[in-house]
Image (cartoon, rainbow, N blue to C red):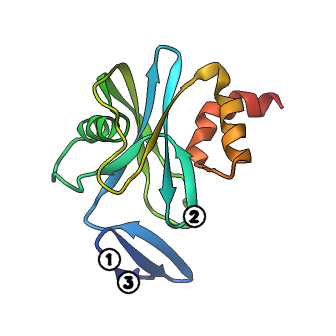
Amino acid sequence: MSAETVWDGKYIKVIKDGTWEYVARTRGIGAAVILAIDEGAVILVEQYRVPLGKRCLELPAGLVGDETEGESVEASAGRELEEETGYRATTLASIGVFHSSPGMVSEGFTLVRATELTRVDAGGGIDGEDITVHRVPLEGIAAFVAAKRAAGVAIDVKLLLLLGGGILAG
């Protein structure tokens, strides 16, 4: 069977391959998701997500290669971390590539650990992003996420990375 592009936009395209329909990024653009750890706390972002119709609690993230062709994953992660959160990392290390919804999208993301953080500004993203930055102690992450969920905030699946031990323990 051959894949057919059904619709092609600036950032995504819809592909039909036999009975499968899925979404892919255009132009070979990838994504970086940043696990930013600062002295026992994790840096999270909260922002409005149009597909969900509400705010979502997430790890900072951004596209790789959308602004500068050939930009490395680590360089993109550092740029996005600073833009979204106001933190600059001395060390950025790729953990690996992961796929969050392989039955619907072909996109994967590279998880990047950011450490040795320095706060250089307030963050909040670029115009119109309205990002709220949260610095949450790791020992309080489960309660923080539960409170956000109770307040109606969507929770990104990647936060399971931080909740895993507690979920497994019951």
**Residue 126 horizontal/vertical position (percent):** 29, 50
Vertical side of 133 occupied by 71: above or below = below
Instruction: Answer yes or no: is residue 96 visible.
Output: yes
Q: Which residue is mark 2?
A: 52
Nearer mark to the viewer, of 3 and 2: 2
Whole-number angstrom distance, CA of label 2 to CA of label 1: 20 Å
Q: Mark 1 near mark 3, Cβ–Cβ under 8 Å? A: yes
* Disc 1 residue type (three-letter): Gly
Near mark 1 (Cα within 10 A), the count class, few <14, some 14-19 or many ≥20, is few
Q: Please tell me which residue is depicted at 32% across the width and 27% down the height of the picture.
A: 92
**Residue 62 horizontal/vertical position (percent):** 35, 48
In the rendered structure, find residue 83 and report the number of the disc placed on it: none
Q: Which residue is mark 1?
A: 9
Give 160 or 94, whichever is nearer the viewer.
160
Whole-number angstrom distance, CA of label 1 to CA of label 3: 7 Å
Q: Which residue is mark 3?
A: 7
Give 84 or 66, whichever is nearer the viewer.
84
Nearer mark to the viewer, of 2 and 1: 2
Whole-number angstrom distance, CA of label 3 to CA of label 2: 21 Å
Q: Please tell me which residue is depicted at 19% across the width and 54% down the height of the picture.
A: 67
Counting residues from the start of the chain, the first of labels 2 and 1 encountered is 1
Q: Please tell me which residue is depicted at 34% across the width and 46% down the height of the picture.
A: 125
Vertical side of 2 occupied by 80: above or below = above
Q: Please tell me which residue is depicted at 24% across the width and 56% down the height of the picture.
A: 66
- Of the 4 image quadrants, the one containing the N terminus is bottom left
Give 32 or 51, whichever is nearer the viewer.
51
- Of the 4 image quadrants, the one containing the C terminus is top right
Near mark 2 (Cα within 10 A), the count class, few <14, some 14-19 or many ≥20, is few
Callout count: 3
The residue at the far right in this view is 170
